[in-house]
């Protein structure tokens, strides 16, 4: 059986949580490989709604191993808050079904402070981060001054790491007119939480390779979306990690040959949270309708999402970069009742046609969408579980998307409910 990587192929919020949960029934191991608690995955199972940020979506299923890989940046206090909330909903979480890579970098309160201080200082030039310290934590990782999970097991190592970390952050805070870090308080907090965190710590790279040799089926779960990728997203309005499928390998310690099928999650229209270019954004009644019908508010921040027509150019681009084998098309039911639908097939920038989004920020800001119009449908697609349940025009819309993005639909989601899913191609099949 193939191992599967799930990535968002737009700006995030594509419905990855439901799809990963649906696929996790077929998997043995579900591993998060990047991002932090800026992710927001909502699962609807029966009458219960689970909201996850750090924990892999498979944690709500019994008998599965959930893994937080080294590509993630981990806020331990946020983690245990999330564990407490899920436990109150009846989800059992222990070292028997959750492991954390020993070399995972930690998000500390000072990272959140820096995130907020910078956004406030930036004013109109702010990026629109969640303020949860994700970017500063990744900066410290590549700057070789992170405190990692394993460091909590040795006080001498922890003290050395703290000295290096605070020498950097206190200088930054001085420049932002903020008080220096209380070293003793931070050290005490880390030592207090260390025993709780270390019980989950494992050499994930070794365990994952053992799982692979044993024939276990692995589901790799990405966070955010491909258009927020630090290299290929709409820079600088991006996240601070690699959100493409290749990160699944380095973010867990498995080689790229472990990846069998790449599934891109794609919403039937386009949304974005925060700042940055958005060529198909709608500031009209249609955009308002998409937002209201799609309940477009961020799981983590509660911020209203910007909404627009489906952008086939961007999805074709992200599918190519991540090597997507098939997409899971979500929220098709939100388009029910529209008389006409539009799909972006290219851009005009200063009179020149582009079949991709240019890299230069100035060109991105001036990109105007070139649209193709299609007839909508008045029937309901909500809850459809087979092609026969879909209106003819809905099928035409899906088929046209496949043509334009040069990638087939493997799954089609027609509501937040777990079972309202049409399976076209099983990603776990060889």
Image (spheres, rainbow, N blue to C red):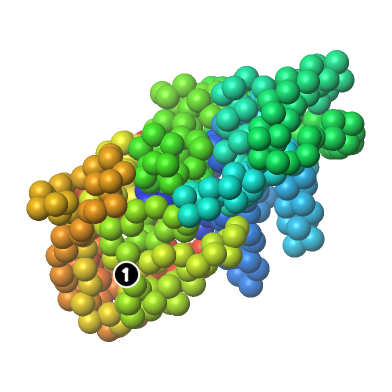
Front-most of residues 160 and 124: 124
Res 300 → quadrant: bottom right
Q: Where 148 falls versus 374 (above or below)?
A: above
User: Going 15% across and 47% down the picture, which residue do you hit?
Assistant: 354
Locate the N terminus by quadrant. Answer: top left
Q: Where 176 falls versus 10 (above or below)?
A: above
Locate the C terminus by quadrant. Answer: top left
Q: Is residue 9 left or right of residue 373?
A: right
User: Going 28% across and 62% down the picture, which residue do you hit?
Assistant: 280
Q: Which secondary structure, mark 1?
A: loop
Picture mark count: 1
Res 148 → quadrant: top right
Residue labelled with disc 1: 282
Locate residue 252, reporting x and y percent: 56, 28
User: Going 38% across and 66% down the picture, which residue do you hit?
Assistant: 307
Locate residue 251, reporting x and y percent: 53, 29
Locate residue 153, reporting x and y percent: 83, 23
User: Going 28% across and 39% down the picture, which residue do you hit?
Assistant: 359
* Residue 64 seen anywhere in this rendered image of the structure: no
Locate residue 272, reporting x and y percent: 42, 58
Q: Is residue 218 left or right of residue 244?
A: right
Front-most of residues 426 and 166: 166
* Residue 240 seen anywhere in this rendered image of the structure: yes
| Mark 1 neighbour class, 10 Å CA radius: few under 14, some 14 to 19, many 20 or more | some
Q: Is residue 155 left or right of residue 136?
A: right
Front-most of residues 212 and 277: 277
Front-most of residues 281 and 224: 281
């Amino acid at each position: 059986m193939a191992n599967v990587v799930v990535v968002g192929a737009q700006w995030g919020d594509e419905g990855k949580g439901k799809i990963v949960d649906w696929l996790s029934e077929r998997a043995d191991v579900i591993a998060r490989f990047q991002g932090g608690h800026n992710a927001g995955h909502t699962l609807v199972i029966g009458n219960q709604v689970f909201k996850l940020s750090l924990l892999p979506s498979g944690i709500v299923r019994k008998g599965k191993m959930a893994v937080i890989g080294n590509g993630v940046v981990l806020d331990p206090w946020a983690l245990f808050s999330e564990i407490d909330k899920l436990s109150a909903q009846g989800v059992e979480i222990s070292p028997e079904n959750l492991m954390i890579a020993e070399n995972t970098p930690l998000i500390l309160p000072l990272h959140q402070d820096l995130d907020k201080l910078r956004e406030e200082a930036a004013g109109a030039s702010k990026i629109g981060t969640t303020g949860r310290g994700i970017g500063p934590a990744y900066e410290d990782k590549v700057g070789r001054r992170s405190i990692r999970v394993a460091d909590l097991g040795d006080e001498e190592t922890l003290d050395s790491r703290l000295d290096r970390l605070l020498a950097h952050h206190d200088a930054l805070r001085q420049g932002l007119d903020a008080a220096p870090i209380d070293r003793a308080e931070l050290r005490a907090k880390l030592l207090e939480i260390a025993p709780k965190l270390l019980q989950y710590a494992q050499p994930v790279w070794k365990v994952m390779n053992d799982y692979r040799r044993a024939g276990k089926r692995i589901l790799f779960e990405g966070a955010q979306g491909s258009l927020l990728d630090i290299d290929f997203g709409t820079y600088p309005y991006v996240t601070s990690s690699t959100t493409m499928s290749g990160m699944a390998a380095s973010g867990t310690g498995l080689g790229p040959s472990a990846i069998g099928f790449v599934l891109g999650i794609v919403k039937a229209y386009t949304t974005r949270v925060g700042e940055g270019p958005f060529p198909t954004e709608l500031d009209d009644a249609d955009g308002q309708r998409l937002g209201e019908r799609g309940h477009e508010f961020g799981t983590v921040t509660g911020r209203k999402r910007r909404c627009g027509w489906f952008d086939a150019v961007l999805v074709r681009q992200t599918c190519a970069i991540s090597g997507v084998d098939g997409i899971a098309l979500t929220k098709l039911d939100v388009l029910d009742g529209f008389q006409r639908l539009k799909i972006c097939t290219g851009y005009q920038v200063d009179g020149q046609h582009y079949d991709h989004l240019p890299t230069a920020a100035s060109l991105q800001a001036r990109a105007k969408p070139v649209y193709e119009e299609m007839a909508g449908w008045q029937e309901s697609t909500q809850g459809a579980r087979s092609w026969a349940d879909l209106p003819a025009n809905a099928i035409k819309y899906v088929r046209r998307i496949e043509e334009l993005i040069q990638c087939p639909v493997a799954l089609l989601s027609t509501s937040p409910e777990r079972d309202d899913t049409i399976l076209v191609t099983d990603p776990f099949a060889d």
